[in-house]
Image: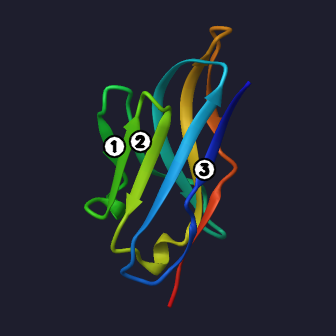
């Protein structure tokens, strides 16, 4: 069993900052790409940012220069630091990880989602 647990969502004013954290736990052999996706009401889930095991990052154009993704391989965690938040960043944010479990199966895992609301 592998689980992803997110934390750090909440309400923030426009222009503010917020950090999201996600920890993977369970029967983990290796973690490959980790990242964050988001889904706003009435919209499809979209990529926010990903980070490979070696540290290579990929960002959506809409958040470049405002969000930073990082990971701690020793702790199996991924962090999303969000600054200069805009109302259009309001969404449920989902943690994602591509993980090989101890039974040697590799699959994509998702967290339960955490709400981020940007509003005055």
Residue 58's disc number? 1
Question: Foreground: 4 or 57?
Answer: 4
Residue at the bottom extreme? 120
Q: Where is residue 94 in the image (x, y as percent from the top left)?
A: 59, 51
For marks 1 and 2, the one nearer the N-term is 2
Q: Would you place residue 14 above or below residue 104 in this image?
A: below
Nearer to us of marks 3 and 1 is 3
- Residue at the disc numbered 3: 6
Determine whether the residue tagged by mark 1 lies in a helix, strand or loop: strand
- Is 115 displayed left or right of 69 in the figure? right
Residue at the extreme top: 104
Residue labelled with disc 2: 50
Q: Is residue 18 left or right of residue 2?
A: left
* Disc 1 + disc 2, Cβ < 8 Å: yes
Which sits earlier in the primary sequence, circle 3 or circle 1? 3
Q: Quadrant of residue 24?
A: top right
Q: Which of marks 3 and 2 is nearer the N terminus?
A: 3
- Residue 115 located left or right of residue 35: right
| Label 1, residues with CA under 10 Å away: few <14, some 14-19, many ≥20 | some
Identify which residue is drawn at 65% across, 70% down: 41
């Amino acid at each position: 069993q592998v689980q992803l647990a997110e934390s750090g969502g909440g309400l923030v004013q426009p222009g503010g900052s917020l950090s999201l954290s996600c920890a993977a736990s369970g029967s983990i052999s290796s973690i490959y790409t980790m990242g964050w996706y988001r889904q706003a009401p009435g919209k499809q889930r979209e990529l926010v940012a990903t980070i490979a095991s070696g540290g290579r990052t990929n960002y959506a154009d809409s958040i470049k220069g405002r969000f930073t993704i990082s990971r701690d391989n020793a702790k199996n965690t991924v962090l999303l630091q969000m600054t200069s938040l805009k109302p259009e960043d309001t969404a449920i944010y989902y943690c994602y990880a591509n993980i090989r479990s101890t039974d040697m199966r590799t699959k994509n895992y998702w967290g339960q989602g955490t709400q981020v609301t940007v509003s005055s």
